[in-house]
Amino acid sequence: MSIHPFVFSNSKQYRIARHALFWIVWILYYSIMSALLMTKKYGFTLSFFESLTEVAESTPLDMCFCYFIIYFLLPEFLYKGRYIGMLFLWLAASIFFIVLYELNATFIVPYIRGWYGLKVTVSTPSNYVWDFFTLFSQINMEGCVAASIKLGKLWYIKQQEIDLLKEEKQNIQPHEQQGLVHPAFLTDLLTRMESIANENPIVAAQSMKKIRHLLLYILYENSSAQVSLQKELSLLQEYIDLEKLTNDKEIEMHAVIDAVPDHQTIAPFIILPLVENAFKQVSLFSLAKSKVNLNIQLQQDVLHVALSWSKPIDTSSLTNGRNVILHNISRRLRLIYPQSHELKMMIETEKIIVKLSLNLKKAIN
């Protein structure tokens, strides 16, 4: 199902167009409603143009309040779970804008009505508390409308992305049956993302673009004998970012990629499964501080990868048979880069180290 760009696109022209349309409709609606109340006394035409001027003049206040909510309070407080701070600032902003509305009604609105020849009356409120709550409910109705539109759009997009994830997950099966390389992280990540999309849509929103890149790359580049090293490193960075966002365990990740590829190519999914294995291993261990360190260097056509991750002192090997990943990578390297690679694993007291050296020019295509 395609999403109409006018409603959902972040392109500048679409955003300006839909916001302009919204505020034009807003001004016309309140102008007509106000004019209808004054039609018996001044006639509809005069009432409408006076109301149009009055509403248009006060609309910048409405815009400031609404944009303060959807572009500051929502992303900086609601999305980050800072609910008390959000309620406090919302209340403070409501009071501030109520004061501005009162100043506008006292000093500017009478001039507009006098310019149109309407009778200007300055009334003193008989009940300040009632008037305050009337203005408070009115301004917050406007804010809630803006927030509901923003959150409604976010919910709709998340539903579309969940459907996309399920569809892409089903598309993986034919690729597995064809014997194509399928990194073990994919199924785990898709399942994790389905859960996160329902429980934490803000993290899902940050992750969805990255996981879409991963899916498209895996589905359409997987069958290639060689892929761009630049693409492979970009894919790796996308995966690392996703792990940081979605992993249930807090893992300290240090990655240094000192490689500027110049048209070099590499067999797909050589590096990423190594990193995926490190994250999987460190997630299974019970450690006070979990660390993963990655260093990648490219020296002419030789790629050097040094990867290490924490382990408990009393653990002497990989857990849960995850050394199968290293075995599969080693087997692929022997097939694609015979006599032109070196893969070593070392188990130290508090960490496991994997080192890979690969001559990219000597691949068998």
Image (cartoon, rainbow, N blue to C red):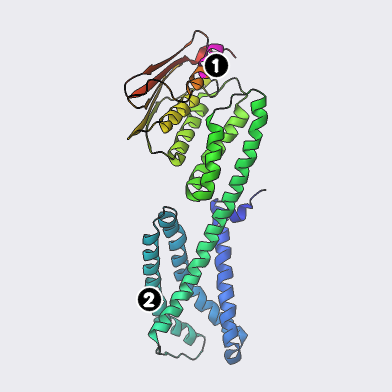
Residue nearest the observer in this picture, 284 or 299: 284
Whether residue 333 is in magenta: the answer is yes
Task: In the displayed orientation, state which residue is furthest to the top.
Answer: 339
Q: Which residue is mark 2?
A: 99
The image quarter containing residue 169 is: top right
Decide: is 339 above or below 219: above
Q: Point out residue 155 in the picture as x, y percentages from the top left corner.
A: 56, 54
Q: From the image, state whether disc 1 or disc 2 is nearer to you.
A: 1
Q: Secondary structure under badge 1?
A: helix
Decide: is 338 above or below 34: above
User: What residue do we see at 39% from left, 61% from top?
Assistant: 86
Q: Point out residue 28 in the picture as x, y percentages from the top left corner.
A: 58, 73
- Does residue 105 appear in the picture of this structure? yes
In the drawing, what numbered circle is on residue 112?
A: none
Q: Which residue is mark 1?
A: 332
Q: 10 Å neighbourhood of mark 2: few (<14), some, or many (≥20)?
A: some
Q: Secondary structure under badge 2?
A: helix
Q: Is residue 244 left or right of residue 153?
A: left
Decide: is 334 above or below 210: above
Decide: is 121 above or below 247: below
Residue nearest the observer in this picture, 130 or 296: 130
Task: In the displayed orientation, state which residue is furthest to the front.
Answer: 314
Q: Quadrant of the C terminus?
A: top right
Q: Point out residue 44 in the picture as x, y percentages from the top left corner.
A: 62, 85
Whether residue 200 is in magenta: the answer is no
**Separation of disc 1 and disc 2 at Cα?**
70 Å
Q: Which residues are magenta?
A: 329-337
Q: Amino acid at mark 1?
A: Arg
Q: Point out residue 337 in the picture as x, y percentages from the top left corner.
A: 52, 12
Q: Amino acid at mark 2?
A: Val
